[in-house]
Amino acid sequence: MAQKQSDPGRLDKIVADARAAYQTRENGYRQRALKLYPHVCGRCMREFDASNLRELTVHHRDHDHDNNPPDGSNWELLCLFCHDNEHQRNIEQITYGDDKRSTEIATHNPFEALKGLMDEG
């Protein structure tokens, strides 16, 4: 069985491509947003550090992922849960428009009789 000859130029190209890809990501909007803003969810105020920073996402306020101004004015950092919630709210707004079905206030109170039960005890 013949052994493959290694091409040193190929390895150099792989390393150069990896460095270029890293630089592209570093200059990407997520890295820029993480440098601009404190590592805190803009909704629930949960704080993030190096161990869980991957759970902090960049949300585009106008929902246009191509709108990435250098000052970050279209971004906010949101945790995964708040980001999903924000997109769900946007879907409901698109689906229902000004119809109040998506923003109805719950009228049922599961604890309504609790005070009476506590007074009896």
Image: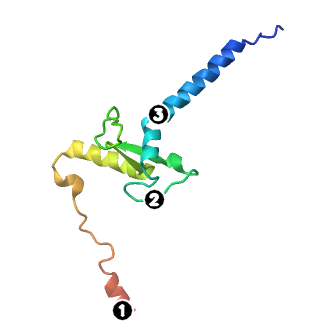
Q: Mark 3 points at which residue?
A: 27
Q: How is the image coloured?
A: rainbow
Sequence-earlier tag: 2 or 1? 2
Q: What residue type is labelled 1?
A: Glu
Marks 2, 3: nearer the viewer: 3
Q: Residue 120 carries which label?
A: 1
Residue 119 versus residue 23 in the image, above or below: below
Sequence-earlier tag: 2 or 3? 3
Q: Mark 2 points at which residue?
A: 46
Q: Nearer the viewer, residue 1 or 26?
A: 26
Q: What residue type is labelled 2?
A: Arg
Q: Which mark is residue 34?
A: none
Q: How crowded is mark 2: few (under 14 residues within 10 Å), some or many (20 or more)?
A: few
Which residue sits furthest left? 98
Marks 3, 1: nearer the viewer: 3
Q: How crowded is mark 3: few (under 14 residues within 10 Å), some or many (20 or more)?
A: few
- What SS does tag 3 mark? loop
Q: What residue type is labelled 3?
A: Asn
Q: Kindly report the distance in space between the C-alpha atoms of the residues bearing marks 2 and 1.
A: 40 Å
Q: Which of 52 and 9 is in front in this view?
A: 9
- Residue visible at 58% across and 22% down? 17
